[in-house]
Amino acid sequence: MYGELGYLNLVRQIIKSGVKEVGRNGTTYTNVGAMLKFSLEDNKIPLLTTKKLAWRVCLKELLWFMNGDTNNKLLKEQNVKIWNGNGTREFLDSRGLNYLKEDDLGPVYGHQWRFWNAPYNREFGCLENYRGKGIDQLQNVINEINKSKESGESSRRMIMSAWNPEQLDEMALPPCHVLSQYHLVDNKLSCSLYQRSGDVGLGVPFNIASYSFLTHLLAKHCGLEAGEFVHFIGNAHIYDDHIEPLNLQLENEPYEFPSLEIKKKRENIDDYEFDDFSINNYKFHKIIKMDMRV
């Protein structure tokens, strides 16, 4: 199934036939291998409508990733709480990261996107200036998109990876959404994402929205239209205490997805700000609360 109906069908499948597992942070019901597809054409943005999605929080986190940031204090200042549990002294110490200051998350997503494999400074950590160090994967993807657009030759090498085995043990949390690939087909930019671990009730809707925002932004920045977002999940799971709220969500009929407006094309990918984005006609059912795992 396509769109939100495909997501809801995955939820039903896992609740009905998922295998019970006990893991690091609780009991889950799991399906191995899942795929979801969403159209991004006509500026559509797949924000789930069967519950209210906190898209502003999602977008702020994405811009933080894109800037190469790993300092959770910058998110806290924007009232974004996604990483709070992973930035505590207790959690960092449990990962053997006693040298990191509280709220320093180590070389997580943003560091790998913009400064791949640049040594993470143990003294200054997230306060260090890493510009010009490592590999700027995000800018490389943009360069490849523009090269493909200008030459007319397709490329299957437009990839950005957050999974860096050399630095996994330095991260507060190893990346869940590990690799995104971009496809320029018929002058439309699409994205496929491989996610090793997907919390289907709470995290996956955010991941869908985040990479759809990113695909739209890259398309806008490169003078293209957005095509599709395709989501592959290795371990698709639902926490046991999310089943009841998800059953409530399954009772809701989906509405049409809203549209995204990116108000201007900035000169550099680093220059985009939250106020450059506008969501139009987002109709949704009420908030459905679920506890977040760390």
Image (cartoon, rainbow, N blue to C red):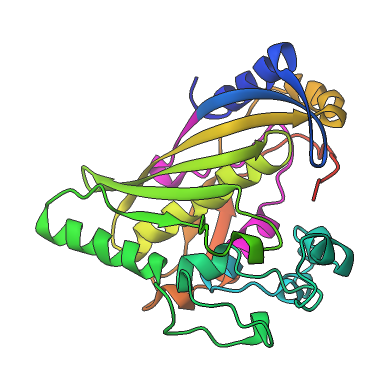
Residue 52 lies in the magenta-colored region: yes
Which segment did they paint magenta?
36-62
Question: Could one spot residue 256 in this view of the protein?
Answer: no
Question: Could one spot residue 28 in this view of the protein?
Answer: yes
**In screen coordinates, is 51 left or right of 31?**
right
| Rendered image quadrant of residue 40 | top left
Residue 247 place in picture, x, y as percent: 80, 21
Who is closer to the viewer here, 90 or 169?
169
Residue 53 lies in the magenta-colored region: yes
Residue 267 place in picture, x, y as percent: 36, 78
Who is closer to the viewer here, 56 or 173?
173
Picture layout, residue 94 above or below residue 201: below
| Rendered image quadrant of residue 196 | top right
Who is closer to the viewer here, 165 or 180?
165
Residue 85 place in picture, x, y as percent: 83, 59
| Rendered image quadrant of residue 134 | bottom left
Picture layout, residue 89 above or below residue 193: below
- The residue depicted at 22 percent of the width and 48 percent of the height is 187
**In screen coordinates, is 122 left or right of 188?**
right
**In screen coordinates, is 113 left or right of 109?**
left
Who is closer to the viewer here, 209 or 109?
109
- The residue depicted at 26 percent of the width and 59 percent of the height is 145
- The residue depicted at 76 percent of the width and 76 percent of the height is 73
**In screen coordinates, is 229 left or right of 174?**
left
